[in-house]
Amino acid sequence: MSHAPSAVPVLTIDGPSGSGKGTISALVAERLGWRLLDSGALYRAVGYAAGMAGLDLSDVEAMTRCAHGTKIQFRPAMDAGETRVVVNGHDATDELRTETAGAAASAIASMPSVREALVALQLGFRKAPGLVADGRDMGTVIFPDAAYKVFLTASAAERAKRRYKQLKEKGLSVTLGGLQREIEARDSRDASRAVAPLKPAEDALLVDTTGMGIDEVVAKVLAVVQP
Ligand code: C5P
């Protein structure tokens, strides 16, 4: 049976980097049996494709063309629960995780025409039985009609610590102080930009995850959908 997209339930999970969005969204999607949209990966993929093509990240026209022309595929990985991101036929999962890729994504994400180029792709993820959408503007711009909205936060120090642990586990060389400065710079750019700034939707449940364990946050978010 096919459903009109507007009839498909959506849970939006927005918040700054390191707030736990990625981990929590994946676990909640798995528990609900819903699809997952990692919208940050789209911006990272476009930034990565632009870098590979040797384009100037500040050239709005080139970035817009790149956003329209980049082929992005999400593929389930051999390790259960992991998703690989394939950009123009190349598995770029590891490159996309770096803070350099995050900064490139944040730079191009401030361009309205780049954001516009990725709208249809994001709306296409809304398929039965439901969608968990992870990002910055999921509840405010892309799925304003979502029935369930959550905004995750955590103190800057805790967010930096989490990202540090995550990147270390992936074998990347980072320092905690450097990471905290990079994250703060990226968040302040994301929150202050003119289009789709990072901010909670008016109808979102705010959850401060500082000091909370993953299971506790998952339970709190699941309770929004299944009270
Ligand atoms: O969530 P993630 O850290 O992968 O996002 C990378 C960057 O992409 C963010 O810092 C933000 O600038 C941009 N982004 C966005 N809107 C989204 C998701 C990500 O602007 N919905």
Image (cartoon, rainbow, N blue to C red):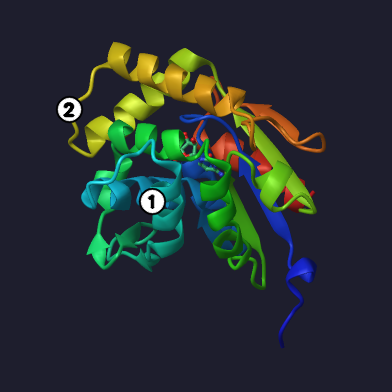
Q: Which residue corresponds to mark 2?
A: 173
Left/right of residue 152 with respect to residue 184 in the rendered view: right
Q: Are marks 1 and 2 in contact (CB under 8 Å)?
A: no
Up/down of 180 relative to 97, above or below = above
Say few, some or many: other residues with alpha carbon within 10 Å of mark 1 (under 14 / 14 to 19 / 20 or more): many
Name above or below for residue 144 compared with residue 103.
below
- Asked whether residue 100 appears in the rendered view, the answer is yes
Q: Secondary structure at mark 2?
A: loop
On the image, the x and y values in percent for residue 223 come to: 73, 45
Q: Quadrant of the N terminus?
A: bottom right
Picture residue at 42% right of the left edge, 22% below the top: 183
Q: Which mark is residue 46?
A: 1
| Circle 1 SS class | helix
Of residue 50 and residue 200, the one placed in the foreground of this image is: 50
- Label 1 – label 2 distance at C-alpha: 24 Å
Question: Residue 44 lies in what quarter of the image?
Answer: top left
The answer to whether any part of residue 30 appears in the image is: no
Tell me: 80 left or right of 21: left
N-terminal of the pair, mark 1 or mark 2, is 1
Amino acid at the residue labelled 2: Ser
Q: Quadrant of residue 153?
A: top right
Is 193 or 4 nearer to us in this picture? 193
- Which residue is at 79% across, 69% downward? 7
Indicate left or right for 152 with 2 as reference.
Answer: left
For ligand 1, tell me if the residue under mark 1 lies within 8 Å.
no
From the top left corner, tell me how far across and down residue 157 is, in percent: 45, 13
Q: Is residue 7 left or right of residue 107?
A: right
Q: Amino acid at mark 1?
A: Val
Q: Position of residue 19 (x, y in %)?
A: 52, 30
